[in-house]
Structure formats: C-alpha cells, structure tokens
Image (cartoon, rainbow, N blue to C red):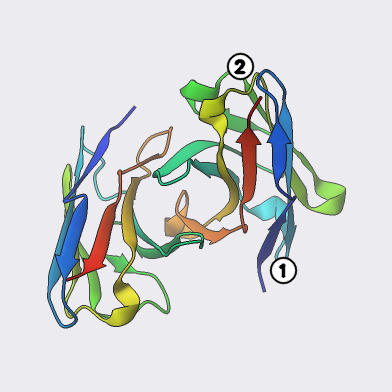
Amino acid sequence: DIQMTQSPSTLSASVGDRVTITCRASQSIRSWLAWYQQKPGKAPKVLIYKASSLESGVPSRFSGSGSGTEFTLTISSLQPDDFATYYCQQYNTYPLTFGGGTKVEIK
Amino acid sequence: QVQLVQSGAEVKKPGASVKVSCKASGYTFTYYYIHWVRQAPGQGLEWMGGIYPNSGGAIYGQKFQGRVTMTRDTSISTAYMELSRLTSDDTALYYCARDGELERRNVIDYWGQGTLVTVSS
C-alpha cells in the first residue's frame, strides 16, 4: 500500500496567515492527489483534485501543488471558516489511502 | 441534488456482524462508484473498498479482505457494506461516499451522513 504522510499534524495560525501543509507519498503517485477539509461532526469535503485543480465552489485562497511524492496545500489568507482538519488522499493505486490529517487551530 | 442517506447507528457485540445501508438519490445510481470509508473516534480516514453499482464488482482493501462484503440493489438505488467478526477496533463512523466523474475518478465528491458502529461487550 502507498503510505501518505502529512506534516505537521497540528498547526496553530491566526486569521490572515498563509498556511502550508505538506503531504508525502511513499512512492510516486504522479498527480493523483486530492485534498479534503473536515470540520467536527461533518463529512469531509473535497477542495483540490489532481494535485492542483480547484474543486468547483472552493474559494481561490486554497491552492495545491506538487507531483511525484511531494505535495502541498496552501491557504493564502486563513479565514475563520478554515479552522478544520485537512487530509490528503492518493488515488494512483488501490487501495486508496489517506494521510493522517493536519488540524489547523486558532493561535 | 445528490444525497446519500445511511442507516442508523448500531451497537454490536464482539464477533458479530453489521450491515450498513446507503440509499442514493439525485443521480443515476449505476453510473458512479460507491466507496466505503471509516473513521475511528478522533482518528483519520480509512478507505475500506468500493463497489461498481452497474456490475456489482467490488474492490476491497487488503486489511478487510475476507471480512467485508459490499453489495448493491439497483432497484432501490442502495448500496450495502457488511463487516463480520467485529472487534472493538471496528468501532467507528462508517461513511458511504460517491466517486467523482471524469478526471475526478476516485476522488470522493459526495458523502453520506455516516453510521456509527459501536462494538462493545
């Protein structure tokens, strides 16, 4: 199975900060990576697919980059609604696998 | 609008089985793969497998092979996930979720509300 490792596991930030989350794959997944946001008590919501494509309706402050084994999710200016947990997911190979999550907390 | 409505919470004893249903509406059920993802309390997301509603063909994560069965009833647009030989480690929120389309294949774009399965003696 392809292992997905996210860092950091927790991130403390303030409204307006630029935030970057990293996701590393144990082998190349080309660009087959998605990012999800999950809020407490809610199902995840897809933000980014194919490493850098913004899902319809997602604010443009979210962006993704990377290919191969290293990927990043960037929030250009953190908003109050963005405090949540973020997961990466590879879909290059079955089984689909998720990173362990990054919780973005209020500083 | 696309909706996935799951069956209610379950409490099971160790060694028992559980079957969770997922009723789809708002789209053509047979056109989109259905994934099953679980989340243990306070933990991350774990993909269990999925099923092609059109053919009934399923792919299971190796961790769940031999213990999970995914089926569907196209006449009522419903997918099912049955997990057997339950242990306390299976206590989790179980989600059904719909696959995306075109270049979003294997990206999950719609989720059910989740079904909490508690395994306790």
Q: How many marks?
A: 2
Select label 1 or label 2 by which is in front: 2
- Secondary structure under tag 2 reads loop
Name the quadrant of the N terminus of chain A.
top left
What distance separates the C-alpha of mark 1 from that of mark 2?
33 Å
Residue B20 is left or right of residue B59, and the answer is right
Which chain letter goes with mark 2? B
- Above or below A87: residue A25: above
Contact flag, marks 1 and 2 (Cβ < 8 Å): no
Amino acid found under the numbered disc labelled 2:
Gly
Please name the residue that numbered disc 1 is placed on: B26
Q: Position of residue A70 (x, y in %)?
A: 15, 47
Q: Is residue A13 above or below residue B90?
A: below
Q: Is residue A99 left or right of residue B105?
A: left
> Is residue A33 visible to us here?
no
Which kind of residue does numbered mark 1 sit on? Gly
| A86 relative to B68, above or below | below
Could you tell which of marks 1 and 2 lies nearer the N-terminus?
Answer: 1
Q: Name which residue lies at 66% across and 54% down.
A: B31
**Chain of the residue under label 1:** B
Task: From the top left corner, tell me how far across and down residue B106 is, in percent.
Answer: 46, 48
Quadrant of image for the C terminus of chain A: bottom left
Front-most of residues A92 and A5: A5
How many C-alpha atoms fall within 10 Å of the one at disc 2: few (<14), some, or many (≥20)? Answer: few
Depth order, front residue of B18/A46: B18
**Mark 1 secondary-structure assignment:** loop
Q: Quadrant of residue A56?
A: bottom left
The numbered disc on residue B78 is: none
| Residue identified by numbered label 2 | B66
* Residue pictured at 16% horizontal, 51% vertical: A8
